[in-house]
Structures are given as structure tokens and as C-alpha cells.
Amino acid sequence: MKTPKEHWRKKSYQKVNLDTKILVVDQILNGQISTNSASKKYDVPRTTISYWLRKYSTLVQQNTGMSKTMKLKG
């Protein structure tokens, strides 16, 4: 238990390179690892991993989205 004089310190994290980000996102989307497990394994906050997943899904939607002519035909 903390004594009244101890202060809470924010944990610092290392910068993560793009290859690691892609690896983490790929493992989570393939069901190989959970977000919580990835957070502990790669020492990255869960909120950061959630951010990567949102960015990835947006990127995929942009790249695999239907063209304007396909939308009009559909």
C-alpha cells in the first residue's frame, strides 16, 4: 500500500516501429492474441492498440471500398 507521501507516476513506454504495429494488429484480427495480452506482451497501452485497430480498419475500408460508379449501380 502506498504511503501518503508516494506519488503516482505515469508509466513510460518505448516507441513502437511500424512492423511491430502491423504484427500486433494482425495477431489480434486473426484471433491469435487478445488486446490485453498484446498490451502486456509488447508493453503497449491497450488504448494505443485500440487506436491502431481503428486506424487499420479505416485504411482497409478506404482501400477495399467500392468505387463511385459501383455505388451508383448498386
Image (tube, helix red, strand yellow):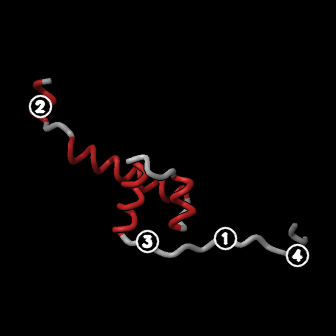
Residue type, numbered disc 4: Lys
Residue 22 in the image: state x and y as whole percent: 35, 61
Residue, disc 4 = 5
Compared across the picture, whether 29 is left or right of 6 comes to left
Compared across the picture, whether 15 is left or right of 37 comes to left
* Mark 3 Cα shell of 10 Å, populated few (<14), some (14-19), many (≥20): few
Residue type, numbered disc 3: Val
Residue 48 in the image: state x and y as whole percent: 50, 59
From the viewer's perspective, is the residue at label 1 or at label 3 nearer? 3
Residue, disc 2 = 70
The dot on residue 16 is 3
Measure how far apart labels 1 and 2 are at the Cα level: 49 Å
Residue type, numbered disc 2: Met
Q: Earlier in the sequence, mark 4 or mark 3?
A: 4
For the point 43% across and 71% down, the residue is: 16
For the point 51% across and 50% down, the residue is: 34
Secondary-structure class at tag 1: loop
Residue type, numbered disc 1: Lys
Secondary-structure class at tag 4: loop
For the point 87% across and 66% down, the residue is: 1
Q: Earlier in the sequence, mark 4 or mark 2?
A: 4
